[in-house]
Image: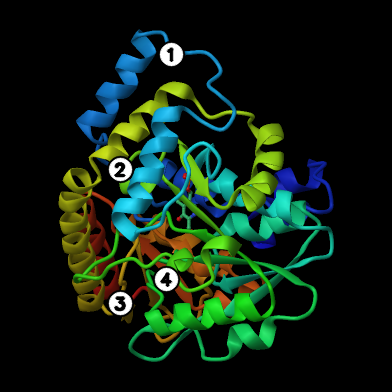
Amino acid sequence: MNQTGTSASKDRAKVCSRLAPFGTTIFAEMSALALETKSVNLGQGFPEDPGPELLRQVAIEAIQEGDNQYPPGPGVPQLLEAVAAHQEAEYGLVYDPATEVLATAGATEAVAAAVLGLCEPGDEVLMLEPSYDSYGAVVAMAGAIRVPVRLSYDGDRWVLPAGALAAAATGRSRLLLLNSPHNPTGKVLSRAELEEVADVCRRHDLIAVTDEVYEHLVYDGRRHVPLATLEGMRERTVTVSSAGKSFSVTGWKVGWACASPELLAGVRAAKQFLTYVTPAPLQRAAAAGLRATHELVGPLVDELQSNRDLLAKGLAAVGFPVRAAEGTYFLTVDISEMTNEDAATFCRQLPHRCGVVAVPCSVFYADPAAGSHLVRFSFCKLRSSIEEAVERLGRLGAGGQW
Ligand SMILES: *Cc1c(COP(=O)(O)O)cnc(C)c1O
């Protein structure tokens, strides 16, 4: 993600060689640009509403009751039990809350701790590409090697090309980082694709780390299928999720990992020296959210699905070739027919041209050129924001100024 660093600060920065190529995350840069230009921010994926009353109330009560010191290292018991109960009720996956669940500082830390705690330097880490921007950075921090496996678009949906993962696996492959529902494409892996992933993991004896933060945010009647539910996968999978996306509290950074005690030992080994623990009152509130999953998630999914439709229809009407989203907060568009600019230039100009912020997908590729025709828009926003963004883009498009 070298193109995202600001050049002025890059000259002076004393960043180590492992991290220097990653620069500043695009989300910080584009959100700052949104504020500066008073743009509608369809860039970073965070909701604009205040989050569920239930979670806010429990967090406030926990703080007022004095739950303000270090919680137990593995997590607050209420959260560990709620995670275990959630995995069993939703997916039939049984975990012992005392030995097989770990609370983390968001899914981001869970993924980082899994990579840092389970990989040796030089190990290969397979990941779908485009990939969430922290993955490449954390693999670099571990001294491991990123091996991207590209998703492609078949004209109708994003697909994991048959055989691509198997072709990328070698004797040095140690871990597979899987994200479904997938950011930034909005793709949900099909049963057949998951079977192929599981097959490669079993044949190459890989550990799977699954980032399932969008597990509940799937549309059109879909159901999320955790990789750990496939045959032979529970014992080789670290299942990761978080409260941020399911309960619209992305600023809380309460996540968790579920795995066998043997695998979780690696995650715990790293996590204890990264953050040690995660804020106690927020863990309690996330536990309350998990206990009320259906009540909270049902209306959220309806709202996000209708937002997705509004944005997809609006973008298509003003001329963007929209790629359908099956889940998540996001959809992608291909700008190659509309402009000669690459996605990074297009997205940096867009706020100045019409007051809309989006994210260039180039930052989700090891080779930015591979994503230079793709732009990601978020629809986890107020309807009024989506309508305003579409109107602004429409005015720009009508003037022929892409
Ligand atoms: C938002 C997001 C995260 C971050 O989760 P936190 O719980 O906030 O750390 C992780 N992975 C993906 C794919 C995301 O989109």
- Report the residue marked by disc 1: 67
At x 72%, y 50%, the residue is: 116
Q: Of the numbered discs in the image, which one, if any, rests on residue 185?
A: 4
| Circle 2: residue type | Phe
Query: Does mark 3's beta carbon lie closer than 8 Å to ligand 1?
Result: no
Mark 1 and mark 3: span between their CA atoms? 44 Å
Mark 1 and mark 4: span between their CA atoms? 39 Å
Give the side of residue 282 with respect to residue 170, left or right.
left
At x 38%, y 27%, the residue is: 284
Q: Does residue 345 show up?
A: no
- Residue 288: image quadrant is top left
First in sequence: mark 1 or mark 4? 1
| Circle 4: residue type | Thr
Mark 2 and mark 3: span between their CA atoms? 23 Å
First in sequence: mark 2 or mark 4? 4
- Report the residue marked by disc 2: 247
The percent position of residue 306, horizontal first and vertical second, equals: 16, 62
